[in-house]
Image (spheres, grey):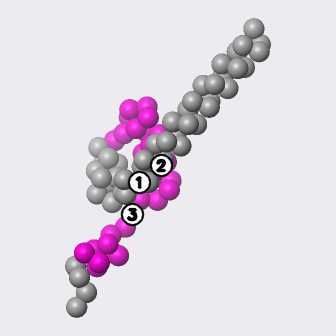
Amino acid sequence: MPDNSETESISRPGTTKLQVAQSVAAGLIGVQSSKNRTRDFQTGKPLHFIIGGLIGTFLFILVIWGLVQYVLATS
């Protein structure tokens, strides 16, 4: 007889890459809905959100740096 934890992990759906990206973006600007936050805590893997957060933060810094470079070049 299979272990219940194995059966639950197989039948439990996870979050998709798009859902992780949307949750990270919403979290970065502080507008995450409670429904999505609950979904993330119940079905998401913490490592996915950590990696997504690092990538999101890096992209945010890159965009800000690019905007500053553009403003300095045009002034």
Identify the residue at the far top of this view: 75
| Marks 1,3: beta carbons within 8 A | no
Q: Is residue 3 left or right of residue 64?
A: left
The amino acid at mark 1 is Leu
CB atoms at circles 3 and 2 under 8 Å apart?
no
Q: Considering the numbered disc 2 on the image, is that residue within a helix, a strand or a loop?
A: helix
Left or right of residue 75, residue 49 in this image: left
Q: Earlier in the sequence, mark 1 or mark 3?
A: 3
To which residue does mark 1 refer? 47
Query: What is the number of the mark on residue 59?
Result: none
Using the rendered image of the protein, determine whether residue 72 is visible from the camera's viewpoint.
yes
Element on which disc 1 rests? helix
Task: Name which residue lies at 75% across and 8% down.
Answer: 75
Identified at 62% across, 31% down, the residue is 62
Residue 44: image location, x then y, percent:
36, 57
Residue drawn 36% across the image and 39% down it: 32
Corner quadrant of residue 67? top right
- Mark 3 residue type: Gly
The secondary structure making up most of the magenta span is: helix
In space, the residues marked 1 and 3 are separated at their CA atoms by 12 Å
Q: Quadrant of the N terminus?
A: bottom left
Amino acid type for the residue under numbered disc 2: Ile
Magenta residues, start to end: 5-33
Q: Can you identify the residue that label 2 sits on? A: 51
Query: Is residue 13 located in the magenta-colored stretch of the structure?
Result: yes
* Between discs 3 and 2, the one toward the N terminus: 3
Disc 3: which residue: 14
* Secondary structure beneath label 3: loop
Q: In the rendered structure, are the residues bearing label 2 and label 1 in contact, judged by CB atoms less than 8 Å apart?
A: yes
Q: Report how far apart the C-alphas of labels 2 and 1 lie in the structure.
A: 6 Å
